[in-house]
Image (spheres, coloured by chain):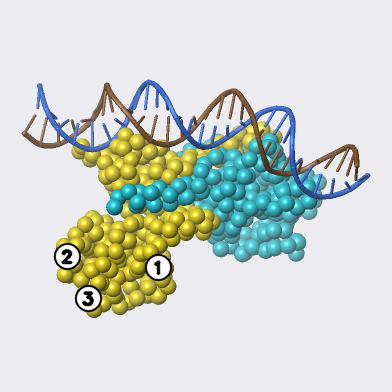
Chain colours: A yellow, B cyan, C brown, D blue
Amino acid sequence: MKNPNRAFKDAIYEQFARVGKAVSSPKRLELLDLLCQGPRTVEVLAKESGLTIANASQHLQVLRAARLVEAEKEGLHVIYRLADQTVCEFFRAMRILAESRLAEVEQIKRRFLEGREGMEPVDREALLKLVREGGVTVLDVRPVEEYKAGHIPGALSLPLKELQLRLSELPRDQEIVAYCRGPYCVLSVQAIEILRAKGFNAIRLEEGIQDLRALGFPIAMGEEA
Amino acid sequence: MKNPNRAFKDAIYEQFARVGKAVSSPKRLELLDLLCQGPRTVEVLAKESGLTIANASQHLQVLRAARLVEAEKEGLHVIYRLADQTVCEFFRAMRILAESRLAEVEQIKRRFLEGREGMEPVDREALLKLVREGGVTVLDVRPVEEYKAGHIPGALSLPLKELQLRLSELPRDQEIVAYCRGPYCVLSVQAIEILRAKGFNAIRLEEGIQDLRALGFPIAMGEEA
DNA sequence: TAAGCATTCAATAAATTAATTGAATACTAA
DNA sequence: TTAGTATTCAATTAATTTATTGAATGCTTA
């Protein structure tokens, strides 16, 4: 009576642990986070996460074995993508749990941002309201493809890489709110640094596009309006 | 420009991975699942999960290091509990992700239940409606303490251990719906087996109390009404 | 104060996981 | 067909994780 149940339970929890093991490595979490932004080739994922190609490939295969991601061969490249939007939501749940339970996360973030202006924690609700109602210039500093895949309605697409060259497109009389992939993406941090150095009144919105989506914020797709 | 960012990201994802590592072992997941039902001593957790005391203790310390659970000394015992209700919700999210992504989970469950009557998948919605509206006798077969901590309003508390002795309390003219901790808890499975052998018209509700809570089902606390 | 119990600690052996390297494969384009 | 590129595979090493065992700790009660 006790034994067959034990085997059943062991088998079930072993399956659950497949997901757990997949998300137990920092590097795999970084890859998963990148894939939450959209499909990517191994090459791109490796570069963005600071892994060698072979190592990235192996981690991706672990994620695939847990069925969290899928791979599709396209010509010379293999394109990885999340198996499902719920994987993105799960990753976010895990991130939020870590943020709420582990004080170290906030500590590391504070240390990284400390001394930089425009990055201080602001009233999130008020800022989001401002963004939603168009009281500010909203700047999307991610690569154009990511903008196309989903952005804040009315946001200007100005990838960090082009920022220096296109400063003239930005208003000097209005507050600028820059955002990117989320609180741990440094694109908007660097954008704010550049903008403030040039005298713009710029602040950072920590929330990334996936956060906004999860918060029920409207998301626009495609080219700039 | 690239290097300090890398260190930041590595530090952040390493923190996230603390949560991932904590939930990467089948046994720790089982312990976590048990703790979702309420606080427990090491001894009880060890027994229920089929671990030695020392091994259970070590796993619990891993969970504690990830701040998913908390321990409190009470006399001779140490009582572990979830650090937070969101941990329970996270565990459930992980379970549901595994169920939806890993066909093996359904397979293992089917194999375990196959051949047993009253356990076939039923129309969940219809059954829940019946339960909610009182068209059936609802039977809670978990230990009394768990019943007290939260149960379906109107449910009878009849722990599996006492079931054989208290069959006379049950109606023969009405359908009986038995539930326990969730789809992978075997208490209600065994209850159904006993009841059907004795000629009762009994079926199983897969959802456990935490599932019902998450679904917004009303939950009653305390003694039987 | 001593005995008994629950829990943790510490040490060990076995198993698993991670990063690295170089070779192999699969596809494209010349 | 060949050369070049992206990815995967296989083998190795180092590091981490797991279960087990027996001893140590800390509390309670006789």
User: Looking at this view, is A155 or A73 the one in front?
Assistant: A155
Residue B176 in picture, x, y percent from top left: 67, 53
Asked whether the residues under the numbered discs 2 and 1 touch, taking CB atoms below 8 Å apart as contact, a structural biologist would say no
- In the drawing, what numbered circle is on residue A33? none
Residue to which mark 3 is pinned: A172
Residue B119 shown left or right of residue A218 in the figure = right
Q: CA distance from mark 1 to mark 3?
A: 21 Å
The answer to which of marks 1 and 3 sits earlier in the sequence is 1
Query: Does the rendering let one see residue A197?
Result: yes
| Closer to us: B161 or A38 | A38
Label number found at residue A166: 2
Q: Secondary structure at mark 1?
A: loop
Q: Earlier in the sequence, mark 3 or mark 2?
A: 2
B109 left or right of A162 in image: right
Cα–Cα gap, marks 2 and 1:
25 Å
Whether A111 is drawn above or below B46: the answer is below
To which residue does mark 1 refer? A120
Q: Quadrant of residue A214?
A: bottom left
The crowd level at tag 1 (other Cα within 10 Å; few <14, some 14-19, many 20+) is: few
Q: Please, what is the three-letter code of the amino acid marked with disc 1?
A: Glu
